[in-house]
Amino acid sequence: MSLAGKGVVVTGAGNGVGKAIATHLAAGGARVVVNDLDADAAGAVAEQIGGHAVPGDAASAPGAEALVRRSWELLGDVEVWFGNAGVERGRTLATSEEDWALSHEVNVMAHVRAARLLVPRWLERGSGRYVVTASAAGLLTLLEGPSYSVTKHGAVAFAEWLSATYRHRGIVVQALCPQGVRTQMLPTGGLQDLLSHDSALTPEEVADTVWEALADDRFFILPHPEVGGYYAARATDTDRWLAGMNKLQRKLDDLAVADPTGGQ
């Protein structure tokens, strides 16, 4: 699709993948609203790309409404929404109630709340595009990331529901599911070492894949194509896949015994 002149919002765009996507879209002619909790980061990116900074919480109900309404004011309309903001909290079953709640709010409900506001207008117009930044963890799982895995599965499920419900009425929904990206959220230590055969991409490489995917409306955007194979294996032989994941977990357990400090 041509993004020339289109009104686009990217949440979580102060750094990492969101920043790279916003930069690529602006270079392609889009009029971009840059959202992030970090107001300074959002402002810096907006200035760099000639966009509009609208900092704030894209996950809460009041925050989502404020962001959408301000974006309508600045852009006239929002034709493409990139729900990119996400959090990872807690690495064990002992993950706190607060971290589970925050993960659900940001990784799932932010999409629900934005869609409630955007979709009615898109239905009237007969077009609109919602891109959910999920994760390979939303198709597979992330060892040492229970709340992240569960809520990213929820993000993918909501994207599937949106697509199945509204695609015949002109709304395109896509789910971005990278595996490893060189950002602050990239796992470090034992887990990343075990997964090192699948290389971590730069945010810019992920943005390039997103740009290509906008042309063919594919649902899954997979910057790591191998994730598609893992996903198919998980679906067709779940017990074998789970056994393989448990084998990785046992290796992590062995690493933890050998180095209880985690390399610190």
Image (cartoon, rainbow, N blue to C red):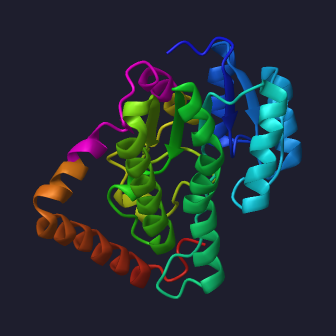
Q: Residue furthest front?
A: 124
Q: Residue furthest bottom?
A: 94
Residue 58 image position (x, y, % from top left): 72, 53
Q: Quadrant of residue 250?
A: bottom left
Residue ID at (47%, 79%) = 259
Residue ID at (40%, 64%) = 142
Residue 228, compared with residue 103, is above or below; it is above
Can residue 181 be seen at all in this image of the molecule? yes
How many marks on residues? Answer: 0
Can residue 199 be seen at all in this image of the molecule? no
Q: Quadrant of residue 137?
A: bottom left
Please tell me whether residue 227 belongs to the stretch shown in magenta: yes
Relative to the observer, which residue lies in front, 91 or 71? 71
Residue 48, compared with residue 64, is above or below; it is above
Image quadrant containing the C terminus: bottom right
75 vs 175, left or right, is right
Q: Quadrant of residue 243?
A: bottom left
Residue 144 image position (x, y, % from top left): 45, 72
Residue ID at (12%, 66%) = 240
Relative to the observer, which residue lies in front, 196 or 74? 74
Residue ID at (71%, 42%) = 15
11 vs 160, left or right, is right
Residue 43 image position (x, y, % from top left): 87, 36
Please tell me whether residue 218 belongs to the stretch shown in magenta: yes
Residue 203 image position (x, y, % from top left): 57, 36
Residues in magenta, as a range: 208-229
